[in-house]
Amino acid sequence: MPATRESTAAVIVAAGRGERAGGDRPKQWQALAGRPVLSHAVEAFSGFGRVVVVLHPDDMEKGVAVLGGQVTLVAGGTTRAASVHNALDLLDGSGMTHVLIHDGARPLVSRDIIDRVLGALDPGLAAAPALPVTDALWRGAEGNVAGAVARDGLFRAQTPQGFGLDAILAAHRAHPGGAADDVEVARHAGIAVAIVQGAEDNIKITWPDDLVRAERLLGRDMDVRLGNGYDVHAFCAGDHVTLCGVRIAHDCGLLGHSDADVGMHALTDAIYGALADGDIGRHFPPSDPQWKGAASEIFLAHAAGRAAARGFRIANADVTLVCEAPKIGPHADAMRAELARIMGIGFDRVSVKATTSERLGFTGRREGIAALATASLVKA
């Protein structure tokens, strides 16, 4: 009979100590997006006929507190195989026809993987997810490469691994011990195991960096900031204006304490705004004579540097110049290139465009130029 969620038990193995992951507690109890790693794995199997979680004997009280009545708890043995065997013995006679055995340290298993394993469980056949090995493989000795290993036909095993309950229970009872996983136990008993497609996101928490990666995959640690900037400068006597770092010949200049680059000022304030870090006037007071006539590149580079120092990258920047003249279009790409250079980001992440105010207001009367800017920052 085909496996269904209702007729299948899930065994989640979490009895190890997981010392390689570091921290002050076993990896299955470490926090991931605000709750234990193990609770994410358990949640993935909601709706199954039975969910059995295998814990270290010292963790049983904690298991009751965290998992409550959601699951059946069983104490593990001295090895992974012994822990699984304990859970299977508990399920003997339960009425479940199949079982999926999953690592409690794989918190990101998807419904798609679970369904693929269930769909492959024909009578007498087991199934497990895996990914083909794509990296070169070496043998090492004394810190040096000692040889290459052919990767053809090699796969990286994942869980959950699915079986007929009676078949895998009998296989465990007959196995001499020392198996790396339940597929090895099944094959020792002559059970064919089908490979189904795994997923790169179905990671096993082993090292400290794995928790960081899992947080990123969950998207819970993503920090995205948006900031807006606005600036205005009046026209004055002169023969050019500097806009977004580009000198443009014009019949007047722009009045300001620095070089009056209205576009770069707006963008600088947008980055400061995204950081909740004040504005240009806070960092470069106009009352300070050292900034008189200063190139606005100094301000923008400072804002970009503060973003980088706090772990952010500038995802994109968008500047709109509002004026009747000069014409911006012919210079827009040069402006984009200059802003990208100063911020240290790609040209394709910077936009510069222009509009008029339909001859309304001070820009319509050609009394000055306004600029609006938006910047988005993403935690690197």
Image: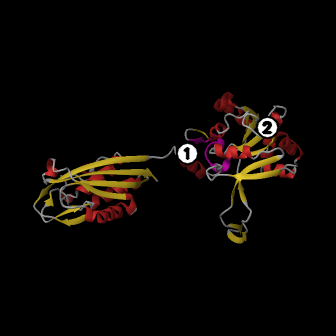
Identify the residue at horizontal 66%, vertical 29% (top origin).
68
Q: Looking at this view, is 45 or 31 the one in front?
A: 45
Q: Is residue 96 left or right of residue 258?
A: right
Secondary structure, mark 1, is: helix
Identify the residue at horizontal 78%, vertical 40% (top origin).
2
Secondary structure, mark 2, is: helix
Within the image, what quadrant is residue 107 found in? top right
Which residue is farthest left?
237
The magenta-colored residue range is 18-32
Q: Position of residue 241 (x, y in %)?
A: 18, 62
Q: Looking at this view, is 272 or 161 the one in front?
A: 161
Identify the residue at horizontal 81%, vertical 34% (top origin).
90
Q: Which residue is mark 1?
A: 218
> What's the residue type where badge 2 is placed?
Ala
Asked if residue 226 lies in the magenta stretch, the reply is no
Q: In the picture, which quadrant includes the N terminus?
A: top right
Q: Which residue is mark 2?
A: 87
Q: Position of residue 43 (x, y in %)?
A: 64, 37
> Spatial distance from mark 1 to mark 2, Cα to Cα?
29 Å
User: Please, which colouring scheme is shown?
Assistant: secondary structure
Q: Residues within 10 Å of mark 1 (few under 14, many from 20)?
A: some
